[in-house]
Amino acid sequence: MPDIDSVFVVDGAYWALNVRWSEVEIEREIALTNQMGMHLRVAGKIVKLLAAFDCTLEISFNGRAADAKSIMSMIELRAIRGSVVQIRAGGPDAARAVQALTDLFAAKFGED
């Protein structure tokens, strides 16, 4: 990973910018507030949403990290309602992907 030139916070997200490599990395914490927590249908919605973005995105919970573009990886998180998950994204579409994911979480995945 290249050296980070600067770090700043915007709307609760940590942004790290490396000017030399033009890479953006974003970290954010989001609460899982839907009724059933992380289950197969929710994982599928996340994977489907993120397929459109040119980025890497990892979601972590309770010491486990998952590739958010892999449904099998996502269901292994076992995050329940009220859990706070950590999101880490990098790549050209990282900012847009994190915002779209934040919106999906805020909408409770269309479940509640």
Image (cartoon, rainbow, N blue to C red):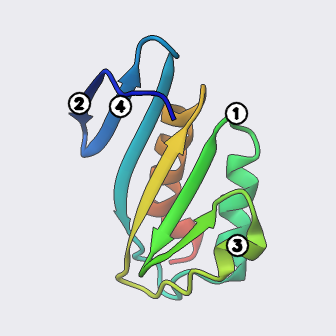
Q: Secondary structure at mark 3?
A: helix
Q: Amino acid at mark 3?
A: Ser
Dot 4 and dot 3 residues touching (CB under 8 Å): no
At horizontal 52% and vertical 16% (from top left) the residue drawn is 21
Q: Amino acid at mark 2?
A: Phe
Q: Which residue is mark 2?
A: 8
First along the sequence among labels 4 and 2: 2
First along the sequence among labels 4 and 1: 4
Q: Which residue is mark 4?
A: 16
Q: Which residue is mark 3?
A: 73
Q: Nearer the viewer, mark 4 or mark 1?
A: 4
At horizontal 47% and vertical 62% (from top left) the residue drawn is 105
Q: Amino acid at mark 4?
A: Ala
Of residue 8 and residue 110, the one placed in the foreground of this image is 8
| Mark 4 to mark 2 CA distance (whole Å) | 7 Å
First along the sequence among labels 4 and 3: 4
Q: Is residue 35 left or right of residue 53?
A: left
Give how far across and how far down residue 110 sits, in percent: 58, 67
Dot 4 and dot 1 residues touching (CB under 8 Å): no
First along the sequence among labels 1 and 2: 2
| Mark 1 to mark 2 CA distance (whole Å) | 22 Å
| Mark 2 to mark 3 CA distance (whole Å) | 30 Å
| Mark 1 to mark 3 CA distance (whole Å) | 19 Å
Q: Which residue is mark 1?
A: 54
Mark 1 burial class by Cα count in 10 Å: few <14, some 14-19, many 20+: some
Dot 1 and dot 2 residues touching (CB under 8 Å): no
| Mark 4 to mark 3 CA distance (whole Å) | 25 Å
